[in-house]
């Protein structure tokens, strides 16, 4: 029997928040497996009604398909390296769909934590190198780290829950960000809208429309962070009738207008 395993590095991000900076209620929808390695200082994650401290020596594991809220008080700074990735098993099924992840992992004490931070910094530098050999070396290192973590904290207890194939297909449709039509989507699955909503919520932790809106917001953030397109181009690509409606929609959900969000990301203030 062959075990099919796919690994995709989504992002490796080095973020810094200065001593004078404070924020609360910074919400972020997480689509992929996300490990938060605190290098220095302190911050907090709120998830599921609980508050988890982010300090050196502890790695925060943010489960996929959840909305996490981040906090930082004025005083100590907060420096972190975030690893976003995806693992797939047989037939390309995401492995996270059949596992429940904890939120805090302590990888062998402060000494090992420091070595991991050094490893992540080297990987960040090598991923920027123009030569393929450097980038491959960084990729192998990151895959090894993820494999260690996966074996340590993500093994299922008991029999793993089988993924709902119909809901996986629905999620792929929603990921395309076509206009949302609940009746049409439910009919394509031979389900009522209420049946579709219940099954999708069990599979993804959110109703289809909520998931679609979160994906839309994530796509908007990515376009603002990584690209140089105008607001009108981004708005049109996401199905908005004009950039002013897009700006109001974005500000209601993020707390910042798109232009201010882009400037903040380019100054290094991002998760």
Image: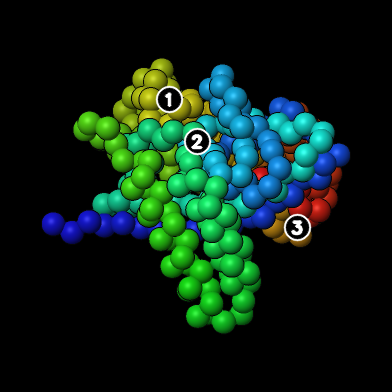
Picture quarter containing residue 158?
Answer: top left
Please give the residue where the numbered disc 3 appears in the rendered image.
229
Whether pointer 1 and pointer 2 mark residues with C-beta atoms closer than 8 Å, the reply is: no
> Where does residue 30 sit, x and y in percent of width and height?
55, 39
Q: Residue at x 44, y 57 (%)?
A: 145
Farthest residue to the left: give it.
1
C-alpha distance separating marks 1 and 2: 24 Å
Please give the residue where the numbered disc 2 appears in the rendered image.
104
Question: How many numbered marks are there?
Answer: 3
Q: Residues within 10 Å of mark 1 (few under 14, many from 20)?
A: some
Picture quarter containing residue 199?
Answer: top left
Mark 3 or mark 1, earlier in chain: 1
Local secondary structure at mark 3: loop
Q: Nearer the viewer, residue 201 or 130?
A: 130
Whether pointer 3 and pointer 1 mark residues with C-beta atoms closer than 8 Å, the reply is: no
Q: Residue at x 52, y 32 (%)?
A: 66
């Amino acid at each position: 029997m062959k075990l099919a395993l796919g690994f995709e590095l989504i992002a490796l991000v080095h973020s810094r928040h200065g001593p004078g900076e404070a924020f609360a209620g910074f919400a972020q929808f997480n689509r992929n497996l996300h490990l938060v390695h605190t290098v220095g200082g302190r911050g907090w994650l709120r998830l599921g009604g609980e508050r988890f401290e982010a300090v050196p020596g502890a790695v925060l594991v943010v489960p996929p398909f959840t909305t996490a809220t981040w906090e930082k008080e004025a005083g100590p700074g907060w420096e972190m390296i975030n690893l976003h990735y995806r693992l797939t098993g047989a037939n390309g099924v995401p492995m996270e769909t059949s596992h429940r992840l904890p939120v805090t992992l302590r990888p062998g004490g402060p000494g090992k934590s420091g070595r991991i931070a050094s490893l992540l910094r080297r990987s960040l530098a090598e991923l920027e190198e123009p030569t393929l050999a450097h980038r491959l070396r960084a990729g192998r290192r990151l895959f090894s780290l993820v494999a260690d973590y996966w074996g340590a904290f993500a093994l299922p207890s008991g029999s793993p829950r089988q993924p709902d194939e119909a809901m996986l297909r629905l999620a792929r449709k929603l990921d395309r960000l076509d206009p949302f039509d609940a009746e049409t989507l439910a009919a394509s699955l031979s389900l009522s809208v209420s049946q579709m909503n219940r099954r999708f919520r069990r599979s993804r932790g959110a109703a289809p429309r909520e998931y679609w809106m979160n994906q839309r917001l994530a796509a908007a953030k990515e376009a603002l962070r990584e690209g140089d397109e105008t607001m009108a181009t981004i708005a049109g690509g996401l199905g908005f009738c004009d950039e002013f409606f897009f700006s109001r929609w974005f500000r209601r959900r993020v707390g910042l207008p798109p232009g201010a969000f882009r400037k903040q990301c380019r100054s290094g203030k991002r998760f």
